[in-house]
Amino acid sequence: MNSTITFPPTEPTLKLPRQTPERWAATLAEERRRLQEDHEALREREQNLRDYETRLRALQAEIEAGRAPQANGRSAPPLSARSTPPPFLRPSSQAPFTDDPTLQAAWEKLHRAREIFEAEQKNLRDDRISLQEFERQVKRREEAVSQREAQLVEREAMVTAATPVPESAAEAQPASTVSKFTRAPFAMARQVFRGKKKK
């Protein structure tokens, strides 16, 4: 069976449309207008920044004039009249928050907590030392007790080796608890019976 082979169609040739000179001129005019607007906006921003800078400098001059020491009742000359700017002078002031009672109470609590903590550390150190000493004493007593037990075992072995064992006792086997319990009524009956005979 013959199958037909189909090839993909060739890509079409793209022809880009050319702009007409009128349209090209309009595009260029639009781009120039945008550039002109951006340029104006940048000029306006630059002018605003310069105005802001002059206001800041004037404010800085007022601040420095107010902080500079006044000699003979005269204020310091403005910044524009000076050749070099004066150094920044801080007003003489005390440490901040010295009169705050809440802060003082918090500092007292902190100092008190620190003292309690140090006291607890000292107590804990003393407890550890006493506990170590107690453990040493317990170990010494344990060693002494183990030595005494060893001596007692040796003495018992010497005593049992030194005492002769009687033959009758060696032959007699110790009675168990059950046998003693079951024989007890009969032994009591015998004793009662022998007591009656004697009378």
Image (tube, rainbow, N blue to C red):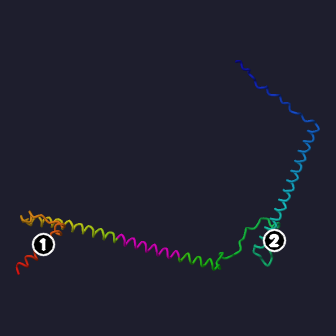
Inspect the image, locate mark 1, and give the three-letter code of the amino acid beneath it: Ala
Q: Position of residue 146 (x, y in %)?
A: 24, 66
Judging depth in this view, the residue of 20 and 108 nearest the camera is 20
Q: Is residue 124 magenta?
A: yes
User: For the C terminus, which image quadrant?
Assistant: bottom left
Q: Which residue is mark 1?
A: 187
Q: Main secondary structure of the magenta part?
A: helix
4 left or right, relative to 165: right
Judging depth in this view, the residue of 178 and 64 nearest the camera is 178
Judging depth in this view, the residue of 176 and 62 nearest the camera is 176
Q: At numbered mark 1, what does the secondary structure look like: helix, strand or loop?
A: helix
State how far apart marks 2 and 1 are (Cα): 135 Å
Q: Position of residue 155 (x, y in %)?
A: 15, 67
Inspect the image, locate mark 2, and give the three-letter code of the amino acid beneath it: Pro
The residues colored magenta run 113-132
Q: Position of residue 186 (x, y in %)?
A: 13, 71
Q: Is residue 39 magenta?
A: no
Residues at discs 2 and 1 in contact (Cβ within 8 Å): no
31 left or right, relative to 172: right
**Can you name the residue that lies furthest to the top here?**
1
Residue at position x 58%, y 76% in the image = 107
For residue 27, which quarter of the picture? top right
Q: Which residue is mark 2?
A: 77
**Can you name the residue that lies furthest to the right here?**
22
Q: Is residue 83 visible?
A: yes
Is 16 above or below relative to 162? above
Residue at position x 43%, y 74% in the image = 123
For residue 182, which quarter of the picture? bottom left
Task: Please give the label number shown on residue 116.
Answer: none
